[in-house]
Image (cartoon, coloured by chain):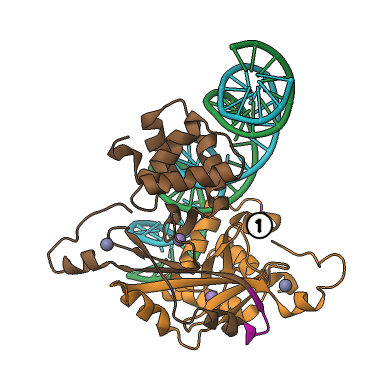
Chain colours: A brown, B orange, C cyan, D green
Amino acid sequence: MGPRSGDPVALRLMERALDAQGLRHTLPRRTILEVVAAMGHPFTPSELTEQVAQRDPHIGRASVFRLLQLLRGCGLVERLHGPDGELYTLCLATEHHHHVTCTVCGRTATFSLEDDAAVGRAVERIGYRMDHHVLQVFGVCPACRDQEQPSLPPEGPR
Amino acid sequence: MGPRSGDPVALRLMERALDAQGLRHTLPRRTILEVVAAMGHPFTPSELTEQVAQRDPHIGRASVFRLLQLLRGCGLVERLHGPDGELYTLCLATEHHHHVTCTVCGRTATFSLEDDAAVGRAVERIGYRMDHHVLQVFGVCPACRDQEQPSLPPEGPR
DNA sequence: TGATTGTTGATACTTAGTATCAGTTAGAGG
DNA sequence: CCTCTAACTGATACTAAGTATCAACAATCA
Ligand SMILES: [Mn+2]
Ligand SMILES: [Mn+2]
Ligand SMILES: [Zn+2]
Ligand SMILES: [Zn+2]
């Protein structure tokens, strides 16, 4: 196994979800799953593809996108709208929630609104019926907040 | 002028905004501005490029993207995260607001939350300091709601 | 009018994402 | 175990978004 295989809980959840869909176990899928589970932060497709190629250069780009789509369908991977393009992230939360992304280090956390239904009511006021909504927040995480005074902010991905 | 030139108010606002930045008046810019002002709904870059080419096939794709970026910088054009990729939209509202997009016809309206600050408080609860947030709602507009029962829903862009 | 500087279109490149398709393989059932 | 087939694969190719360069060009101003 090793640390390179990422969160074993996430790994198991993803494999089970694929099982539940009657999908086959293959080596490329296993490899990509491990890389996704090892990703600590939201990632771009090219970052993921790069890391996958590091483990097995034979795995095609298409298979990476295909699995990303399957995982999104299972609700285990989400696509976030970063200010600088789309980002994918492993997210095991099951209840309705939203994401905050630290603009300094890229760390992403989830949160919920106390009154989430307020959004639906707001659009009802103008005659729309809400289907779903996406809320994406950008800010500074607690860790980066602490190190704010020093000349240079700590660097990190994205 | 003609109907093809789009909302003259929007056109004037955009030209003034570019003026304010010390930017030059050129024919390509004028043409693209007119097309943007004539767009009734959110549009993809390729839709815009197509319409621009219809008026003047010599105008390059790069100039279209360049102007889109300038207009976004002025706050007159926004990029929305559609479920099917990014969309640009002319939006003259100045106060903080959000967008609802009709999943049937593509029509987009703006709205505000009664308690917008609730978002900031929600992320503060987990230690983050909010910088800004993006809320995108998808639903059904009043017009499309009425025509819901008939066998086929009315078609429309995106 | 002429110089300066912003702007333009062509070209090329990167990344996201989808579509095809012929070859391969997981794994069910015998 | 073997066989068969549907699922899966990587290669290839394509479209679209977006950015970077750069030489030619033109809006503005002295
Ligand atoms: Mn999530
Ligand atoms: Mn707007
Ligand atoms: Zn941070
Ligand atoms: Zn509608």
User: Residue A137, located in which quarter of the rendered image?
Assistant: bottom left
Residue A7 lies left or right of residue A125; in this view the side is left
Give the x, y percent position of residue A49: 43, 38
Q: Is residue A129 magenta?
A: yes
Residue depicted at x 42% and y 61%: A83
- Disc 1 residue type (three-letter): Glu
Q: Chain of mark 1?
A: B
Residue plotted at (60% across, 63% down): B32
Picture coordinates of residue B66, whole percent (x, y): 49, 58
> Which quarter of the image is occupied by the N terminus of chain B?
bottom right
Residue for point 87% across, 66% down: B151
- Location of ligand 4 given as a quarter of the image: bottom right
Residue B144 in the magenta stretch? The answer is no
The quadrant the C terminus of chain B occupies is: bottom right
Q: Is residue A38 above or below residue B73?
A: above
Asked whether the viewer can see residue A68, the reply is no
Magenta stretch bounds: A124-130
In terms of depth relative to the viewer, which is nearer, A122 or B82?
A122
Residue A70 appears in the figure: yes
Q: Is residue A109 left or right of residue B116?
A: left
Q: Position of residue A15 (x, y in %)?
A: 49, 42
Tag 1 secondary structure: helix
**Quick one: B21 or D28, which is closer to the camera?**
B21
